[in-house]
């Protein structure tokens, strides 16, 4: 694994005002570190934060989970998902809340929508291939992998220009543009943030290296290889859906990612069909919600 020199982290710490780890996350991580974590206590801890509770219930009742019935309280959610998945959902919500739109030069709602889609696609892929990587690990990496981008967008008012240049020029990566402009990049900033929030060390390392084209040549840990391969495929699927072209990195990661996940072309296309169905369902979700409310009012017998 690559370790960042301490002087780099010191430069990041001096130059950036990164969001501190929320107290709720500190308490939750402390509870989970106990020899026998109490489900009731953890559910009660989360329930004390109304916004976090609502966000968790909204996610668990979304089409991504495909539940036959709605989950109505946090205790049910904890029992259904398990402690690791609940911790991932809470961490993700708190991360989204950590940045303020009025301080940021990019549209945070769009950014987090994309991050959520990547996280959902990573879970979809993991389930489809029956990956041994826990789904909560895939979801957390999908949501957190670009978390350094909002930090840069808060720190530098002109960051939107760097982002637009990288999006329009696939001959040069986003991290290269960032390095040229600011002498750091979102992978390093994301690594620092994830470390400061005490995310798993493997997740922090994958955040650091998620644009490293030599990752598969230098990493021999099979679980990390599978996790990275899943992330890069998920990124590419979302990019295809949103921008109708492959992601910038996919040309460098494709062969290795497919080999690591043991996917033939037909298998890849099968997953791609499931991805397209997910996005169709997502587009129809507001209409289905409206129709359900309409029917519940008794206008149709």
Image (spheres, grey):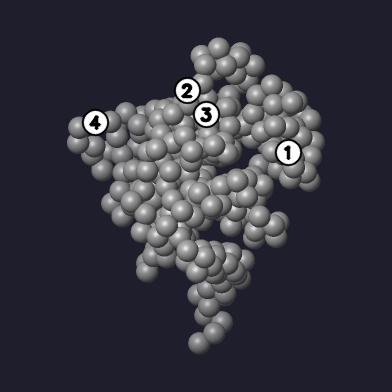
Tell which tag, 2 or 3, sits nearer the viewer: 2
Q: Secondary structure at mark 3?
A: helix
Tell which tag, 4 or 2, sits nearer the viewer: 2
Characterize the local packing of mark 1: few (<14), some (14-19) or many (20 or more) Cα atoms within 10 angstroms. few
Q: Position of residue 2 (x, y in %)?
A: 48, 26
Q: Which mark is residue 221?
A: none
Q: Can you identify the residue that label 2 sits on?
A: 3
User: Disc 4 vs disc 1: Cβ atoms closer than 8 Å?
Assistant: no
C-alpha span from label 4 to label 3: 26 Å
Q: Which mark is residue 172?
A: 1
Q: Earlier in the sequence, mark 2 or mark 3?
A: 2
Q: Position of residue 149 (x, y in %)?
A: 64, 35
Q: Can you identify the residue that label 4 sits on?
A: 34
User: Disc 2 vs disc 1: Cβ atoms closer than 8 Å?
Assistant: no
From this view, report whether residue 297 is shown above or below residue 106: below
User: Disc 4 vs disc 3: Cβ atoms closer than 8 Å?
Assistant: no
C-alpha span from label 2 to label 1: 24 Å
Q: Earlier in the sequence, mark 4 or mark 2?
A: 2
Q: Earlier in the sequence, mark 2 or mark 1?
A: 2
Characterize the local packing of mark 2: few (<14), some (14-19) or many (20 or more) Cα atoms within 10 angstroms. few
User: Disc 4 vs disc 2: Cβ atoms closer than 8 Å?
Assistant: no
Name the outermost residue toward the bottom.
301
Characterize the local packing of mark 3: few (<14), some (14-19) or many (20 or more) Cα atoms within 10 angstroms. many
Q: Is residue 133 left or right of residue 285?
A: left
Q: Can you identify the residue that label 3 sits on?
A: 191
Q: Earlier in the sequence, mark 4 or mark 3?
A: 4
**Residue at 64% of width from left, 16% of height from top?**
15
**Camera-nearest residue between 78 and 271:** 271
**Residue at 80% of width from left, 36% of height from top?**
161
């Amino acid at each position: 694994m690559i370790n960042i020199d301490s002087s780099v982290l010191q430069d990041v710490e001096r130059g950036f005002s990164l969001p501190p780890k929320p107290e709720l996350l500190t308490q939750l991580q402390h509870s989970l570190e106990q020899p026998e974590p109490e489900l009731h206590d953890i559910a009660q801890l989360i329930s004390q934060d109304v916004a976090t509770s609502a966000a968790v219930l909204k996610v668990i009742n979304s089409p991504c989970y495909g539940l036959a019935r709605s989950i109505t309280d946090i205790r049910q959610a904890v029992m259904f998902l398990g402690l690791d998945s609940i911790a991932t959902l809470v961490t993700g919500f708190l991360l989204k809340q950590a940045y303020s739109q009025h301080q940021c030069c990019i549209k945070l709602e769009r950014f987090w929508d994309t991050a959520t889609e990547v996280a959902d696609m990573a879970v979809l892929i993991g389930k489809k291939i029956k990956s041994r990587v826990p789904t909560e690990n895939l979801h957390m990496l999908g949501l957190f992998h670009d978390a350094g981008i909002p930090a840069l967008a808060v720190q530098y008012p002109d960051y939107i220009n760097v982002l637009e240049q990288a999006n329009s020029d696939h001959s040069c990566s986003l991290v290269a543009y960032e390095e040229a402009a600011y002498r750091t990049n979102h992978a390093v900033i994301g690594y620092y943030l994830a470390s400061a929030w005490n995310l798993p060390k493997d997740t922090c390392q994958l955040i650091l290296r998620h644009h490293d084209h030599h990752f598969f040549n230098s990493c021999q840990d099979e679980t990390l290889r599978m996790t990275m391969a899943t992330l890069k495929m998920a990124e590419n699927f979302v990019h295809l859906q949103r921008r109708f072209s492959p992601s910038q990195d996919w040309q460098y990661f494709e062969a290795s990612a497919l080999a690591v996940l043991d996917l033939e072309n037909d298998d890849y296309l099968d997953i791609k069909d499931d991805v397209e169905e997910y996005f169709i369902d997502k587009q129809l979700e507001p209409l289905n919600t409206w129709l359900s409310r309409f029917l519940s009012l008794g206008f149709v017998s």
